[in-house]
Structures are given as structure tokens and as C-alpha cells.
Amino acid sequence: MSKVVGGVGPAVLDQRVVAEPLLFVSGGKADVRIEDSLGGGCLNALKAAAAQGAAVLPVLLVGRDPLRRLLEVLVRQQFPQSLLLSMLRETRRSVLCGDSTVTVRSDMVCQRLPESTQQRLRAADLVLMAPMTEVDTQFVASVLRLARQSVLLLSSRQLADSEASVSLSRLATWTIVNRRELAVWTGCESLEAGLLILRGLGVEQLLVTHSDGVVIEEQGRSRFQASVPVEQPVSTVGAGDVFAGTFAALVANDSTVDDAVRGAQIAAAVHLSLPAGNGQEDSGSRIAPALANARCTLSPLPFRRGSVHRGVRRLVPPLAATSLLLAVLAASFAG
């Protein structure tokens, strides 16, 4: 029976601007094409979780404006089992151009989930809490208290309130931030010093991601797993969501944290290798075969100050490394 991964967060209307880069000049005018699609970290992560065989339960926050109808149609096409809750004042929108994104965030008009939704989340094997804003701390805390296991993602706005972010992280099973977000959270550019600060505040289980690899902070000890090399990344958009969703699905399925991190890194590498647009949206169906082909079982790597571990051979057996690279290449050129 498939494990159930719930996800709570805003449904986002992504509006991608398609135009020649040279057209964007100061004071100039350009004809562009705007493509509307369904987005948001919550849904993108759940797509990756579903690619690992998880049964996903999206709990999506939507606005009370007319754009809600468009989002509902887009959501039902991909996730008919979704629960849509009109808890935002306005629909959240993101405008994407290349690797740059600007987002219009709206305040919540209600901070309490319906009782029936709470029951569904309590029954899930794991709940992924998507990034919110600094004024949503009570809501996020209530979701984390419902969950058997949870993965918490924090926005820069949430991390700016370091005390509230610490309290939320202590409620979560795992919290995922990247290196830049860690610096915002702790006010410290040093990775080691930032980890020591959070350790002293009671944050016990944390993943810190970076292009070089992932630091796993667990019960007061740190270790490092290097990234899967990607020769020519096509686009970084959504890679963090793929990492989080894959990690959540593997943890829900009782994988060790090290194997879950490695699987998430492989999934992110496959995603980075895919072309933008339709190919990237279909990345979930290509990640699962890559993970199966890699068959990598990893022992923990010690975290060393200033170290950068590169290359697959230090992390996986030669046969697994070969199959992993072939799988990534096949995913890049499939379709």
C-alpha cells in the first residue's frame, strides 16, 4: 500500500514571460507571450513525491478572487483529489522570466483548517509544509502539530523572524533550507557557526542544501553528502521543490535519511538536466527510473570544514555510478 504524503501550501498561478532576452532593455517595448500554468512549491514537491509512488494529498490555499476558478480547473486536471481552501485574500501569482521569479503574496483571511481536513492530515504518513509568510506562524505550527512526520520548508520572510522559525523547526521532523537561507536565519555567513547557533537553540534535525552538496544535521552531529554532478544544468527553477518532495516520499517510505537525501539529490540532478517548459513539467515521470537504475546505497560522509566533495565515484559503487550517469543522460534526451 502506498504511503500518503500530504502537502499544505498555496496554489500559485505561474505566469511565464516568453521573449528574446535582448528585448528587455531600459525604456524599450517588446511583444511577449505569457503562459499561465499551475505552480507553487507545494504542488511541485508533491509531483516529485508522486513520482516515487507516494499517494499525495494536496491541501491547497487559494484566494477569494475570480482567479480562484482558473486555479481550480488547473488543479483538478492534475490532482483531482486535492482539497482547495479559500483561505487567502487574493490568488498568489508568480511571474517567471528565465531563472528569475517575482511573487505576489497575499495575506491569509483564516488561520484554521476545517476539522475534516485536519483529520485527513493526521492520517497521512508525512506532511510537507510549504513556505508561507512571517505572519502565518500560528497556522504553520497547527499543521506541524497534526502530523506524524513532517518536512518543513521556510521562506526568506519567515526566516527573517529567527525566533519563530526556530520554534517551527523544533515542531518539524526535518527542516530544509539552503545555504543562503541559513545565513538569513542565523545572521551568520559561516556555515559551521550557523549550525552551532541552531543546535544551541534546540534545532536537532536539519538539511542545508547547496550546489556542492547537503549537510545533514542530526541530533547534534553533522555529516556531508556531495551533490550528483550535472555537466550542463538547463534550468535551476524547481530543483529545490523536487529535492524536498523526493526526500519527503522516501522518508515516508521508511528510507534512512542518508538514502533519502541521496535519492533527492539524484532526482534534482535529473530535473536540472531537463529542458524548460513541457519537458521540465514531465520530469517526475523520468526521475523514478533514474533512481531505480542507480541502486545506490550510501554510507554517511563526514562533514569537514571547507571541504567540497566532487565526483560520483566517491559516493557510489562503480556500477551504480555508471547506471546513474546513463540514467541522467537518458532522461535529458528522452522524448
Image: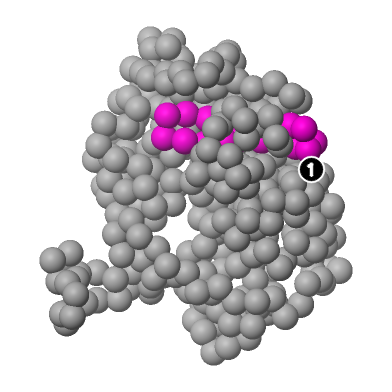
Indicate yes or no whether the magenta region holds residue 207: yes
In the rendered image, is residue 158 in sight? yes
329, above or below 107, in the image: above
Residue nearer the viewer, 241 or 183? 183
| Residue 248: in magenta span | no
Report x, y in % for residue 188.
Answer: 58, 39
Q: Amino acid at mark 1?
A: Arg
Which of 99 and 249 lies nearest the eye of the viewer? 99
Could one spot residue 51 in this view of the protein? no
Bounds of the magenta segment:
199-214
Q: Quadrant of residue 29?
A: bottom left
Looking at the image, residue 270 sits to the left or right of residue 156; the answer is left
- Left or right position of 123 against 102: right
The residue carrying mark 1 is 170
When asked about the image quadrant of residue 191, the answer is top right
In the rendered view of the protein, which quadrant contains the N terminus?
top right
Q: Residue 72, percent across and down?
A: 56, 77
Q: Position of residue 117 (x, y in %)?
A: 79, 66
Please provide percent x and percent y for residue 267: 45, 37
